[in-house]
Image (cartoon, rainbow, N blue to C red):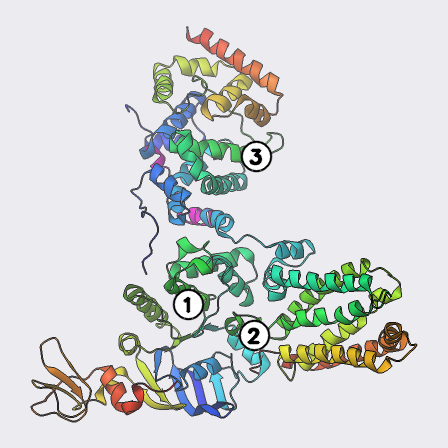
């Protein structure tokens, strides 16, 4: 029983092809994306929230959002995995809603804000870790400063979202971010 | 890339045994590296459950207004779904009912020979619910009947639930229309008992004949009786409408409707097993 | 194992006799019903599907007597029925329609029900059309939705009236694969105009005519009725008999042996036509 309707997608299709197919309401493409991305999203979200039910719900919400917003993806130009992650972390955030009591204390590392997905950011972190000085600098950073750096630089949240996540006023989060940057710069030079 | 997340590192990461810097390194790397993402093991059962939950949201049909209203009233979801699919609860039917009621109300304002009259409204209002009941079940009104009549839910309970739903809706519309009548007094609700009688009566008759026939017979009988009476009572000097109103909707008549309605209900309860008004049984 | 017992079944509509005393015993596996229009196939299947009450005769279906209300409901719980003209609500999506029928089949838990709806959509390969409204589906797709509703709840008895109508050859092949798989563990009754469907699928075939079962046996036995009745000859046969020219240039005739004719292997269709005689061709509705 064959069907017409658009290009077929397979396990070999790229994320971008799958997202395009999802934008054309192809359920099989959504399933392939889910199979490909749900496991690592689960692993990563689990490190931020200990409650597996909340994580599962956040992942479900993520793919519902992917289904509805896939047509918007091409506009953003971001890497597909990073785009999906951004949705996932925000879904987790809104699933948690209230204070961040279930949130695991974050450990942080710095990369230039907003540059999460670019190779240079990654290279920088890797370099830093390999040479040990960034690792050392991070471990000497007070936990509340590390947390705000993680939320913004690694998880890709805005300062406002990070503030909500950490349960502090936005102004406080901003101050902490600036202090964290200053401390890191200090420690790394 | 010079570096990949090897299995031990991934394992440490998942168990939470890495220091802050390494966690970040793993996460930043995974965001950019598809082959490392693919090494995160996915439990098939979990994946399946999780994806089904996603599908539940993206594929599930959007609930209709009627369905959502019924759910708000505390009707279980599955029952609301069945009731909302009743032909008589579709928009076209509701619109038709509203139009008829609007005419009846306007007629009350325009009146006859300069006198405002409720008679038109009182004549029509009891018939609408019974017509709605006629559309609740059966091959004539439901194109899916051939399929739905062979499901375990077919038969008495489905008929009665649907009848209840449509009667509820069309009577509420009737009551709303009655609020708009010029002279609201006691007579504005005088049609309720006849309406109940017609509905219960046609359901009771459905144990021996198709629903549509039963509803048609009773609805037709009602209109005939009212019209004939109006003509019989017509005489010089008699205010016909008021006389008919007294005869058909007065206290004596209401008592009779109540008794007849209870009798119909009794028959319905006793013969409910035979309530399969597809015409086939 | 016998799952369906039919004894002396009769049904008339006004003065038309639709079923004239049908006696059959049917077991698990696939049974095909063949016959011209008006032979009583649909009436018989409707009686078995509890859509129609027979005038006389007895039925025992999966151990239930559909004449009794409680047993009828019990039977309906184990029954899947694809009617000849399934009327589907055009404004419902495929998913919504199946969801609705699933509720009627007493799948009340929303989550479980949706899972079952997706399963049957998958079975008929319509998963990607779940959200499409029925009126926007092609005829073949609608037929598949209609088949999918019969599969809801994994019934023990499947009654399929003309299931291959509206399917293109490729869909028909997938459909056959599905039906034959379903027939491995349950009772499947299907009526068809396509003698090839019967040959490909059914271990048993019942030919109906004038409200009676006039043949009951294997497809091979049905073809066997035309042994020494099918001929190939170099010249077209004389007289007004029906014949056609085959790919190798010879003439194929059913009936009396034409001059120089040599016997050939009969098909199920040959057996069917031999059995019904001229009535099968251009029979009145």
- Asked whether, in this view, residue A157 is left or right of residue B3, the answer is right
Q: From this view, report whether residue C242 is shown above or below residue B29.
A: below
Query: How would you rate the neighbour count of disc 2 (Cα within 10 Å): few for under 14, some for 14-19, many for 20 or more?
Result: some
- The reply to whether the C-beta atoms of the residues labelled 3 and 2 are less than 8 Å apart is no
Query: How would you rate the neighbour count of disc 1 (Cα within 10 Å): few for under 14, some for 14-19, many for 20 or more?
Result: many
Residue segment shown in magenta: B36-50
How many callouts does the rendering have?
A: 3
The residue to which callout 2 is attached is B140
Q: Position of residue B220 (x, y in %)?
A: 71, 79
Occupied quadrant, residue B162? bottom right
**Residue under disc 1 on the same chain as residue under disc 3:** no
Residue B85 falls inside the magenta stretch: no
> Mark on residue B185?
none
The residue to which callout 1 is attached is C147
User: Chain for mark 2?
Assistant: B
The residue to which callout 3 is attached is A94
Magenta segment, prevailing SS (helix, strand or loop):
helix
Q: Position of residue B230 (x, y in %)?
A: 82, 78
Residue B249, visible in the rendered structure? yes
- Asked whether, in this view, residue C282 is left or right of residue A164, the answer is left
Q: From this view, report whether residue B87 is shown above or below residue C161.
A: above
Front residue of C282/C102: it is C282
Q: Residue at x 58, y 54 (%)?
A: B63
Q: From this view, report whether residue C24 is shown above or below residue B37.
A: below
Residue B38 falls inside the magenta stretch: yes
**Residue under disc 2 on the same chain as residue under disc 1:** no
Is disc 1 placed on a helix, strand or loop?
helix
Which quadrant is the C terminus of chain C positioned in? bottom left
Occupied quadrant, residue B225? bottom right
Q: CA distance from mark 1 to mark 3?
A: 42 Å
């Amino acid at each position: 029983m064959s069907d017409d309707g658009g290009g077929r997608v397979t396990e070999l299709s790229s994320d971008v092809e799958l997202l395009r197919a999802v934008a054309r309401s192809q359920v099989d493409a959504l399933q392939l994306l889910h199979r490909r991305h749900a496991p690592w999203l689960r692993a990563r979200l689990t490190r931020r929230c200990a409650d597996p039910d909340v994580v599962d719900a956040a992942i479900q919400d993520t793919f519902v959002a992917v289904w509805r917003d896939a047509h918007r993806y091409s506009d953003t130009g971001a890497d597909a995995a990073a785009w999906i992650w951004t949705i996932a972390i925000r879904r987790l955030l809104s699933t948690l809603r209230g204070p961040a009591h279930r949130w695991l204390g974050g450990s942080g590392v710095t990369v230039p804000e907003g540059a999460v997905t670019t190779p240079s950011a990654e290279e920088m972190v890797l370099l830093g870790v390999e040479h040990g000085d960034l690792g050392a600098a991070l471990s000497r950073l007070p936990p509340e400063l590390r947390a705000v750096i993680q939320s913004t630089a690694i998880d890709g949240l805005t300062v406002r979202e990070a503030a909500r996540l950490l349960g502090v006023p936005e102004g406080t989060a901003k101050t902490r971010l600036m202090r964290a940057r200053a401390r890191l710069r200090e420690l790394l030079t | 890339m010079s570096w990949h997340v090897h299995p031990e590192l991934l394992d440490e990461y998942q168990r939470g045994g890495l220091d802050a810097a390494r966690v970040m390194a793993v996460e930043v790397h995974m965001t950019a590296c598809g082959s490392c993402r693919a090494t995160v093991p996915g439990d098939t059962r979990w994946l399946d459950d999780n994806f089904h939950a996603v599908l539940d949201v993206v594929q599930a049909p959007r609930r209709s207004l009627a369905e959502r209203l019924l759910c708000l009233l505390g009707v279980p979801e599955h029952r609301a779904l069945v009731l909302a699919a009743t032909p008589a609860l579709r928009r076209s039917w509701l619109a038709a009912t509203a139009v008829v009621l609007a005419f009846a109300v306007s007629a009350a304002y325009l009146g006859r020979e300069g006198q405002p009259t409720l008679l038109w409204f009182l004549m029509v209002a009891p018939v609408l619910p019974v017509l709605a009941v006629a559309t609740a079940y059966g091959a004539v009104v439901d194109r899916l009947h051939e399929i739905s009549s062979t499901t375990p839910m077919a038969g008495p309970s489905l008929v009665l639930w649907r009848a209840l739903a449509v009667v509820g809706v069309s009577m509420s519309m009737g009551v709303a229309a009655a609020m708009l009548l010029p002279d609201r007094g006691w007579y504005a609700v005088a049609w309720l008992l006849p309406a109940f009688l017609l509905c219960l009566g046609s359901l009771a008759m459905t144990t021996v004949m198709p629903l549509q026939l039963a509803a048609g017979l009773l609805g037709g009988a009602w209109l005939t009786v009212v019209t004939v009476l109006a003509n019989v009572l017509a005489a010089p000097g008699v205010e016909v409408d008021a006389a008919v109103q007294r005869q058909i909707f007065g206290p004596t008549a209401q008592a009779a409707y109540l008794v007849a309605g209870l009798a119909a209900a009794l028959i319905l309860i006793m013969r409910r097993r035979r309530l399969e008004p597809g015409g086939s049984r | 194992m016998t799952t369906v017992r039919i004894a002396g079944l009769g049904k008339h509509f006004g003065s038309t006799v639709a079923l004239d005393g049908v006696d059959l015993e049917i077991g698990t596996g696939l049974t095909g019903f063949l016959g011209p229009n008006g032979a009583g196939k649909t009436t018989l299947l409707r009686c078995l599907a509890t859509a129609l009450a027979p005038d006389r005769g007895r039925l025992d279906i999966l151990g239930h007597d559909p004449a009794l209300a409680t047993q009828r409901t019990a039977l309906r719980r184990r029954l899947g029925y694809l009617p000849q003209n399934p009327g589907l609500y055009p404004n419902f999506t495929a998913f919504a329609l199946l969801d609705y029928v699933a509720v009627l089949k007493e799948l009340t838990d929303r989550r479980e029900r949706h899972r079952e709806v997706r399963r049957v959509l998958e079975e008929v390969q319509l998963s990607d059309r779940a959200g499409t409204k029925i009126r926007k589906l092609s005829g073949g797709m609608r037929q598949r939705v209609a088949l999918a509703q019969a599969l809801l709840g994994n019934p023990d008895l499947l009654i399929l009236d003309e299931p291959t109508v509206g399917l293109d050859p490729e869909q028909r092949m997938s459909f056959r694969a599905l039906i034959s798989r379903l027939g491995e563990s349950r009772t499947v009754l299907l009526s068809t105009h396509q003698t090839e469907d019967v040959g490909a699928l059914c271990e048993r075939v019942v030919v109906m005519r004038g409200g009676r079962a006039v043949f009951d046996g294997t497809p091979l036995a049905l073809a066997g009725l035309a042994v020494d009745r099918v001929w190939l000859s170099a010249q077209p046969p004389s007289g007004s008999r029906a014949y056609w020219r085959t790919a190798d240039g010879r003439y194929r005739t059913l009936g009396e042996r034409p001059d120089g004719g040599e016997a050939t292997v009969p098909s199920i269709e040959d057996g069917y036509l031999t059995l019904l005689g001229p009535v099968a061709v251009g029979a009145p509705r």
